[in-house]
Image (cartoon, grey):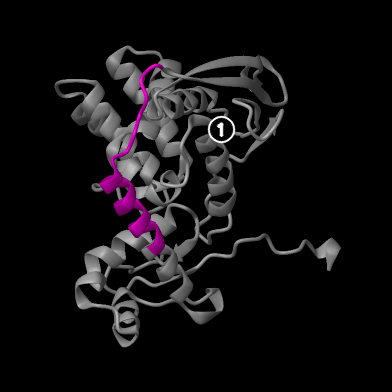
Amino acid sequence: MQGLIFVTWEKYLSERFSGSVLREYRDKLGNALPTALLASRVYDDSVLLTGVAAASNITSVPVEILLREFGRYFITNGLTRHLCAYILTQVHSGRELLLAMHDAHQQMSRLPDGLTPPLFQYTTRNKNSNELTLIYDSPRKLCSVLIGAIEGAAERYGEQVHIFERTCMKRGNSVSRFEIRFSASSKEVLETREQSERHQAKQHFAQYILSLLPNNGGGGVTLAELQKTLALRGIQQERIRPALLLEALRHLHYAGLVATTANHAGDDLMHRRYWRAPTSDPPSPASL
């Protein structure tokens, strides 16, 4: 499971509960948790599932409520908003966000990090409809997180959402099936012109960076090597500061478009390598 999930889970605990809950939580899990969680790393699913049970025991809040609240928090909190900006700047409604999540999860499953993000299936009545049917099939059975994420998508765009759960894996069905209907809120969420222009500039810069990265066969490039390439192309030094390059690379990574050596033994930021992730699945042996 992606490290961003773990980092935002602890942020949720620290913001949702006052006092020493987060410290008790970490004490209870002990060595099962690394000293410092990193959003760029991949961690075992069981650590989070054990952690949710521990948090429920400490706070006396039922597991399903914690999971639903966390799903909503994950979509709306500032860290996710920053790291997933490449995706978020391209969508303008809760429905569009769910469809973008489908594409992003599919793309992240192609990264060489062993990620297994939940792959949703959608059916829609027509392109402009605010309704859709979502089919969720995951061995994790984290339906409550998904419901919270749908609610968070609506909240992010100032919308209302109605979720009808038709089938559920936890009730013995083979899949969980949700019928979802978004409706506009009386409170309209608007960006200023300056915000929109700033987001678009970052989007274009990230796309340019992506075009310069080698594919997997190229072995990847370090941040310093990428900076040198940009300098040779005449890009102003102010625009290729390491912090700006790193931000673009992170945004692309959380969209599943850039792979890194973050999970390789001995990796550090100075020597980390980046390359373009494949954007389609390899053909199966039967189709060769």
> Does the stretch in magenta take in 187?
yes
Q: Residues within 10 Å of mark 1 (few under 14, many from 20)?
A: few
124 in relation to 287, above or below? above
Residue 59 at what x, y percent from top left? 28, 16
Residue ID at (56%, 16%): 163
Q: Report the residue marked by disc 1.
A: 140
Closer-to-camera residue (88/278): 88
Magenta residue span: 186-204
229 in relation to 87, above or below? below
Residue 146 at what x, y percent from top left? 51, 28
Does 255 sit left or right of 205 as displayed? right
283 in relation to 48, above or below? below
- Residue 116 showing in the rendered view: no
Q: What SS does tag 1 mark?
A: loop
Question: Quadrant location of the C terminus?
Answer: bottom right
Residue 49 at what x, y percent from top left? 44, 31
Q: Quadrant of residue 261?
A: bottom left
Residue ID at (32%, 23%): 55
Residue ID at (38%, 55%): 251
- Residue 282 showing in the rendered view: yes
Residue ID at (35%, 29%): 189
> Does the stretch in magenta take in 239?
no
Residue 38 at what x, y percent from top left? 30, 51
Residue at the outermost left position: 19
Closer-to-camera residue (96/192): 192
What secondary structure is the stretch in magenta mostly built from?
helix
Q: Amino acid at mark 1?
A: Arg
